Image: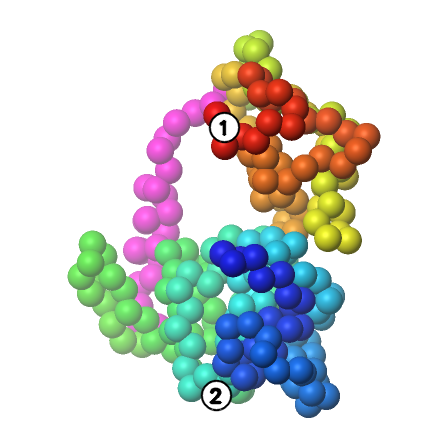
Amino acid sequence: ARYGWNHTVEQVVATGIHRTDIPLHAATGADRGQVAAILRRLRLQPLARRRFLTLSYGERRLVLLARALASRPGMLLLDELLNGLDEANHQRALRWLEGSARARLPWVLSTHRIEDVPASATHALVLEQGRIVYRGSIRRAPLARWLQRQTATSGSGRQYPGGRRSSGPALVRLTNAHVHLDDHIALKDVSLTIRAGDCWVVHGHNGSGKTTLLRTLYGDHGVAVGGRIERAGIEPGVPLQVF
């Protein structure tokens, strides 16, 4: 993503077979068969022909997991793997983790949420303020005491009144906006107005266009002909970096 290497998902996963950063070898029939099997295992077959940079944050995480599996690792270290995944992808990743016992592939998963702990986990090591407070069998680990307590106290407690609409000046306005990433329609016919004093929440499943919407508002993506984006104090066509 940092270098703009916009290969297909199939190509990205295949680099795991040869352990290269980018595709340096033409994929053989055996390579493609191995990639297809891994994508099936993670239920990612529909993404095989998609370009990596058109994927959502959550989709990219699972594709990179597939790439790691293609390298046939002796062990996997999974740092907050389930963060940023919507419900469907969260369940997809959990199903793979819970079925990994049959593959005899050891893994270590770090998490802060009890719902991210797979049923196939065998051992637990719990850290609190940088110190080990438990290590041993997961059956005897009082995970709920730590993880649920952390969840319960992590909120700020700030309340936002529902139903109130700001009457402040418009900062950004989208009108009938369509955004295309390669041949993929990432946003379709979006209209919204964000005013000073507003508090917005953008939610949806992985790949629904949340990041694309934010990057469009920021100026990384242009709006297709027929739509319009307006920003307070910025003339159309002027790069945002000027301001």
Nearest the eye: 128 or 225: 225
Locate residue 192: give its quadrant.
top right
**183 lies left or right of 85:** right
Q: Is 159 inside the magenta-drawn segment?
A: yes
Q: Which residue is mark 1?
A: 242
Region of the chain picked out in magenta, as a range: 138-161
Disc 2 element: loop
Q: How far from the left and from the top, in percent, is residue 187? A: 72, 41
Nearest the eye: 26 or 14: 26
Q: Amino acid at mark 2?
A: Arg
Nearest the eye: 113 or 23: 23
Q: How far from the left and from the top, in percent, is residue 106? A: 42, 82
Disc 1 element: helix
Name above or below for residue 81 compared with residue 33.
above
Q: Residue at point 23% right, 57% down?
A: 128
Mark 1 or mark 2, which has the lower sequence index?
Answer: 2
Which residue reaches farthest bottom? Answer: 30
> Does the rendering let one see residue 124?
yes
Give the CA distance from mark 1 to mark 2: 54 Å
Q: How far from the left and from the top, in percent, is residue 45? A: 71, 70
Q: Residue at point 68% right, 26% down?
A: 229
Residues at marks 1 and 2 touching, judged by CB atoms closer than 8 Å: no
> Does the rendering let one see residue 213?
no
Q: Which numbered marker is on residue 104?
A: 2
Locate residue 240: give its quadrant.
top right
Q: Nearer the viewer, mark 1 or mark 2?
A: 1
Q: How far from the left and from the top, in percent, is residue 138? A: 35, 72
Locate residue 55: give its quadrant.
bottom right
Q: Residue at point 50% right, 28% down?
A: 242
Q: Is 216 inside the magenta-drawn segment?
A: no
**86 lies left or right of 107:** right
